Image (cartoon, grey):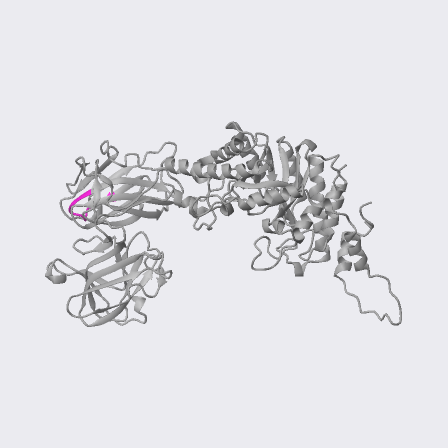
Amino acid sequence: MKHVYKKIGYSSMIAILLSSCAKPDFSTYFVEKPESVLVQEDIDSYAPLISYLDKDANPDFKFGVAMNMDDYLNKGVMYRLANRNFEEIVMGYEMKHGSIVQADGTLNLAKVEELIAVAKENNMGLYGHTLCWHSGQNANYLNSLIAPITIPGTGGPTWDIVAGADFESDDMSNYEYSTNAVVSFTADGEGANGEGRALKLVNESVRTNDWDVQFFIKFSPAVVEGEKYMLTFDIKSDDPATFGTQAHTVPYSYKHWDFFGSVSSTTSWTTFSKEVTITPDLATSGAIAFNLGKEATAFYFDNISLTKYNEEGSGGGVSEAGYALEINNPSIVNAWEAQTVYDLVAENNEGLIEPNTEYILKIVAKGSKSGNISIDLQSTSDYQGNGFGAIALSTEYQEYELRVTTTAVRNRFIINHGQYDGTAFIDDVSLTKAGSSTNLINNSDFETGISGWFGWGNSSTRQQSAEGQGYGGPGGGVIEKTPEEKEQIISQALETFIAGMMEVSKDYIKAWDVVNEPMSDWPDQYALKTGVGKAEMAEDEFYWQDYLGKDYAVKAIQYARQYGNSDDKLFINDYGLEGGGDKCEGLIAYVDYVESKGVTVDGIGTQMHIDINTSKDNIINMYELLAATGKLIKVSELDIGLGGNTQTPNATAEQYAAQAEMYKFVIEKYFEIIPKAQQYGITIWGPLDSPNSEYSFWRKGEPIGLWTETFVRKPAYQAVAEALEKQK
C-alpha cells in the first residue's frame, strides 16, 4: 500500500483542517492527536503521485507538470517536487518566441540547451511549448520586419497643411459654430490685409461660460501623441478681447481645456501663430474650439492654417508618374453643384457599403491652388449620405486618410468640388471596410482611363490626366510593404524560429504544441483569432494568421516536420473546449482543414483551466468529440479554481472538497472516454496555489493547486492519486 488511511471524506478533511481547538491543559490530562492532524497525516502518507500510475498498463501515458525554467535549473524545492511526482515537464513561457528571439532577430537558446541537459540527468521528459502563438511573441521585432520603408525628403523638414479656411467660398466643411453665434462674411476687400473676405462671428452678449459660444476648426486624421502642429490665423475684433482654445475629439466632444493657448485680438488685424507638441491629454483630438462666450463683440477670422511638422520632409517634392483623375471646375458654386462620382457595383449585395460600419478612405490629391474639396458616401435611393469631411488641397500631392461610420446602406462614392474653382488631381483611391484589405473602388489608379467615374454640374470636366501627372510616390515619406511581401517576410521569421528551436531540441524533445490557441472566442468560434480591428495590442501580441492567412498552421507544421523528427508528435492546442459552445467543434474542423493541405496533426490539446462549477456534461461531451477524431488527446494545462475568482483566504471546506472531486472527475473521465491508444497524457498547469502578489500573473490569488503555496498537500492531491491508481 502507498498510503495509510483513505477512510475520511474530502469535506470532513477540510472542515477539520480549518477548525480551531481550545488550548489543552497538558498538566491535568492527556489528549489524542486532533482530527485535523490525523487528516493531514492521512494525506501526507500518500506516496509521490507518479507512483500511483501503473506504467505497465499505461506505457504511453505521460503525467506532467508546468514549470518555471529557473525553478528547475536552480534545483530547489520545485525541482524536487517535479522529479518526485511527475514524468514530464513543460515550460510556461521560456520556450516561446518572446523569450528566445532577441531584438535583432537572433535566437538565444542557451537556457533551453541547459534545461535539456538537466532534464536528461533526471530522466525527465520535456514537452515543447509552443512554436506558434499570438501572445508571448517578440512583437516589436516582428513588426519591425514589415514596417514601411522610410525615404528621407531631399528638402529637409517641412510643415504640411492639415486644414485651412480662407472664407473666399461658402465651403464650411472644415469649420462650424454654435447656434447662438451670429455668422456672416465681410465684403470682398475687407479680409486681412485688405484682401478677399473674412468670417464675421458676433457674440451678442456676455454668457455664463466661455464655451457657450464656440467656433470650431475641424481636421482629420486626429492628432497623435508626440506630433507637432502649428496653428496660424489672422484675427481682429470690434473691441479688444481674449479667448481660449480647447481640444475636442469632434466638435462639442470635449477633450482638454487648452489646445493652442489663449488668443488676444484688437481692433486691427493681427496674426496669431503657435506651435504645440501633442501630449497625452490632447491625443485623439480632431477639432479646435475657440471659446468666445465671455466677450460680447464681433470677431473676424481669416486665413486659418493648421500644419503638421514633417521631420522627413516633403520639401523634396513628390515623384509624379503615370496618370491621375483630373477634375476641373471653372467657378465657385455650392459644393454639390459639381460632383464626381463612382457607383459601387453590387452582386448579391457584395460591394455595397454596409450600415453601422466603419470605412477607411485613403486618397492622394493635389490642386492647381490651395482649397478644399469634400467626400461623401451616398444612397442613390434617397440621396442621404455620410461624409468623410473635407481635405485641404495644396499644390503638391499629399496622402490623406479619413474614416466614417455609416448609418445606412450606401452605394455611391462622391467627390464634391463645387466650391473649389481650380483643377484637382486625384490618384490611388482606396475605400475599405475597417478590418478588410479589399478596395471597393475597382478603377482606383486611373492608369487605364477613368472608366466607372462620371459626374455633372457647373460645366466641370473630368478626364484622365496627361501621362506623368499621376502620383508616383513621396519625395520624402514611407513606402508600405505589400501583403505579399509581408507574407514572405513573416513566413521566413517563423521558419527561422522553428528551425532554431528544433536544432537544439530534436534529440530530446519528441512532442510539441506547434500551434497554440488558434480559434476565436466570439462570435464565430469556427473562425481564427485575429488582431485586425483591435483597438489596442499588448506588447507581446502578434497574429501570424493575419499575415500568413488560414494556412499559417500548415506552414508551422511543415517547418516543425522539416527541421524536427519525422515521428515527432505535433499538437494543436486551445482553451475553452469544455465551454459548451462551438469552440471544440471549430478546432476539430480547423484540424481537418489543416490536414486537407497535406500535413498531419498528431494530436489535440485541451487546456482545461476550469473551476468547480464547470459543467460535467460539457466535459464529457468534449471528451467524446475529441475521442471521435482518432487523434492523440492531451489535457495540456489542467488547473481547477473554486469559482467566482475565490481567493485563498476566503476558501471554504465545501469548496476544497468540490475541487478535489472535480480533479478526480476530469482524470477518471479522460481515462474512461479517450481510447487508450489516443491517451497522450495530462499536465497539471498550476501545481501550487497561485500567490496573491504583484509577480503573480496566472489566476492570481486563487487556490488552484494540489499543494498550498507552502508545499502542503491538499485533498486535491489525494484525489489525483486515487484517480491515477484506478487506471489498471
Q: Position of residue 45 (x, y in %)?
A: 79, 51
Query: Which residue: 87% across, 72% down?
Result: 27
Disc tally is 0
Q: Is residue 403 magenta?
A: no
Magenta-highlighted residues: 415-424
- The image quarter containing residue 669 is top right
586 left or right of 359?
right
Query: Which residue: 24% across, 60% down?
Result: 231
Q: Position of residue 582 (x, y in %)?
A: 56, 39
**Residue toward you, 269 or 47:** 47
- The image quarter containing residue 446 is top left
Q: Main secondary structure of the magenta part?
A: loop
Q: Which quarter of the figure is the N terminus placed in?
A: top right
Query: Which residue: 43% across, 36% down?
Result: 492
- The image quarter containing residue 447 is top left
Q: Which quarter of the figure is the C terminus placed in?
A: top right
**Residue toward you, 145 or 289:** 145
Q: Position of residue 198 (x, y in %)?
A: 16, 60
The answer to whether residue 696 is visible is yes
**Residue toward you, 653 or 487:** 487
415 left or right of 15?
left
The answer to whether residue 178 is visible is no
274 left or right of 90?
left
- 23 in relation to 449, above or below: below
Q: Position of residue 295 (x, y in %)?
A: 25, 71
Residue found farthest to the right: 29
613 left or right of 274?
right
